[in-house]
Image (cartoon, grey):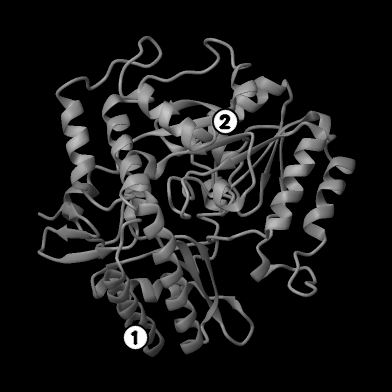
């Protein structure tokens, strides 16, 4: 009996995959190995979680060593290594202005960030962005707008949440002049504050500095600067969700460092633990100092084994040349994507930063989203032993998220398969 057959009687439909989904038994570097003997090149990286690929020797060694020392203690009741050392290094690498609190998952960190903002400001309102993804808990699903399916049947949701437009310029309904961000993305806040909610009621604006699930959308820098200034003007806290864009993915530890826009609060998860569950809420020290004792907590946050693994990832990022490799390989990825765009008119847009990149599939006659073709390309790629993921509300973007230590030869192999897969999908 296959794993798929075994799981059918154990899991609800929301946790099931189709019969073509591989059942993996091992991961090593950029590759996954299946129960039927296949070797699959993994450009999903556990949804941007395996920063150094599968079972990186230094991450495994650090976790294994910690398993023999302390597996769990509870950071709400005790201090312990390597929790403190990891916090020290993260704060140093983010400029020394922040304090942090460790959690387990991205959704938990984002929920914690909103709690912190409300607690520190004593204001009730959160403003999120359209096309955003922030998590699957009730609060984070409330601020998620990348797909209505994530919110279906869960109403009523968290109150006092409002939404603004995120500049997805390839699909903007507004007039663009000289390639500049349309004025409507700026003036919308004036309308929001005048007609719907006064800025004095707003605790925070939360956004992804680069949208992930919504389509790997990179916003214009001038718009990010405007939102930063707007928050300063009205004493609104700016929260960056760095769950997918953080921990090296853009070529710096966090995307806000790459972009040069400093948030008041930001969240980190996915790649931070090198494959083990770990997340963090970062807040400027003066904000964190308002978060009173007992105001937040959790049992497993900052688990010693996860923290040990994170320290090994940090060492590779900064001392093993991985951040530099990410920047270099990212340029190669975007060059390869542009080459494919020139070859295939069904690729309407390519975009990204570092090793967080996407290709958007369209119907050439009108640039309408072509989710069916995107799905066919992903299917053809898996037949050729390359694992890819889609993103965007229309599922018409392929996101390329290889390990940050990927080499050029592996990228060449992947793009050869992608090229073949697009050709095969168009024929079918």
For numbered disc 1, what is the local secondary structure?
helix
Q: Is residue 11 left or right of residue 336?
A: left
Instruction: Report x, y in % for residue 149.
Output: 52, 51
In the image, residue 397 above or below residue 83: below
> Where, by quadrant of the figure, is residue 203 drawn?
top right
Of marks 1 and 2, the one in the foreground = 2
Crowd rating for badge 2 (residues with CA inside 10 Å; few <14, some 14–19, many 20+): many
- Residue appearing at x 72%, y 50% in the figure: 225
The residue singled out by tag 2 in the image is 113
Question: Residue 228's image quarter?
Answer: top right
- SS for dot 2: helix
The residue shown at (50%, 42%) is 135
Q: Is 7 left, or right, of 175 in this rendering?
A: left
**Which tag, 1 or 2, sits closer to the chain's start?**
2
Q: Position of residue 125 (x, y in %)?
A: 72, 32
In-image side of 22 versus 93 (left or right): left
CA separation, marks 1 and 2? Answer: 45 Å
Find residue 76 and name its label.
none
Which part of the image, by quadrant, shows the N terminus? bottom left
Residue drawn at 77 percent across, 43 percent down = 229
Q: In which quarter of the image is the C terminus?
A: bottom left
Quadrant of residue 283 in the image? top right
Is residue 14 something one can see in this rendering? yes
Residue lying furthest front: 319
Residue at the spot of label 1 = 424
Q: Is residue 399 visible?
A: no
> Which of 206/97 is in front?
97
Q: Is residue 272 or residue 121 the one in the foreground?
A: 272
Question: Could you tell me which residue is drawn at 35 percent across and 56 percent down?
Answer: 404
């Amino acid at each position: 009996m296959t794993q798929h057959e075994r799981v059918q009687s154990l899991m609800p439909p929301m946790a099931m995959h189709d019969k073509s989904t591989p059942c993996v038994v091992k991961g090593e570097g950029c590759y996954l190995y299946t129960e039927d003997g296949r070797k699959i090149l993994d450009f999903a990286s556990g949804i941007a979680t395996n920063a150094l690929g599968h079972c990186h020797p230094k991450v495994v060694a650090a976790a294994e060593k910690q398993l023999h020392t302390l597996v769990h203690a509870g950071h709400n009741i005790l201090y312990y290594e390597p929790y403190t050392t990891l916090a020290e290094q993260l704060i140093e690498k983010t400029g020394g202005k922040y304090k942090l609190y460790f959690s387990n998952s991205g959704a938990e960190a984002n929920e914690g960030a909103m709690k912190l903002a409300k607690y520190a400001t004593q204001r009730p309102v959160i403003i999120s962005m359209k096309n955003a993804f922030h998590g699957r808990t009730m609060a984070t699903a409330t601020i998620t707008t990348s797909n209505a399916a994530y919110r279906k049947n869960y109403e009523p949701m968290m109150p006092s949440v409002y939404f603004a437009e995120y500049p997805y310029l390839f699909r903007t309904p507004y007039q663009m002049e000289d390639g500049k961000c349309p004025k409507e993305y700026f003036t919308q806040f004036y309308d929001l504050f005048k007609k719907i909610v006064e800025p004095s009621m707003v605790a925070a604006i939360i956004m992804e500095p680069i949208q992930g699930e919504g389509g790997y959308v990179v916003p214009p820098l001038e718009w990010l600067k405007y939102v930063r200034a707007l928050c300063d003007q009205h004493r609104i806290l700016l929260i960056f969700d760095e769950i997918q864009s953080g921990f090296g993915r853009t070529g710096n530890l966090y995307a806000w460092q790459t972009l040069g826009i400093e948030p008041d609060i930001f969240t980190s998860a996915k790649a931070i633990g090198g494959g083990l569950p770990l997340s963090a809420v970062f807040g400027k020290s003066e904000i964190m100092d308002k978060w009173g004792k007992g105001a937040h907590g959790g049992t497993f946050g900052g688990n010693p084994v996860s923290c040990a693994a994170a320290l090994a990832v940090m060492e590779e990022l900064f001392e093993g040349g991985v951040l530099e490799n990410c920047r270099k390989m990212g340029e190669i990825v975007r060059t390869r994507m542009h080459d494919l765009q020139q070859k295939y008119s069904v690729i309407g847009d390519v975009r990204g930063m570092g090793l967080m990149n996407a290709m958007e599939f369209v119907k050439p006659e009108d640039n309408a989203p072509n989710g069916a073709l995107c799905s066919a390309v992903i299917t053809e790629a898996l037949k050729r032993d390359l694992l890819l993921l889609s993103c965007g509300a229309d599922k018409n973007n392929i996101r390329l998220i290889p390990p940050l230590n990927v080499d050029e030869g592996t990228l060449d192999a992947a793009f050869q398969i992608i090229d073949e897969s697009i050709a095969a999908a168009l024929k079918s």
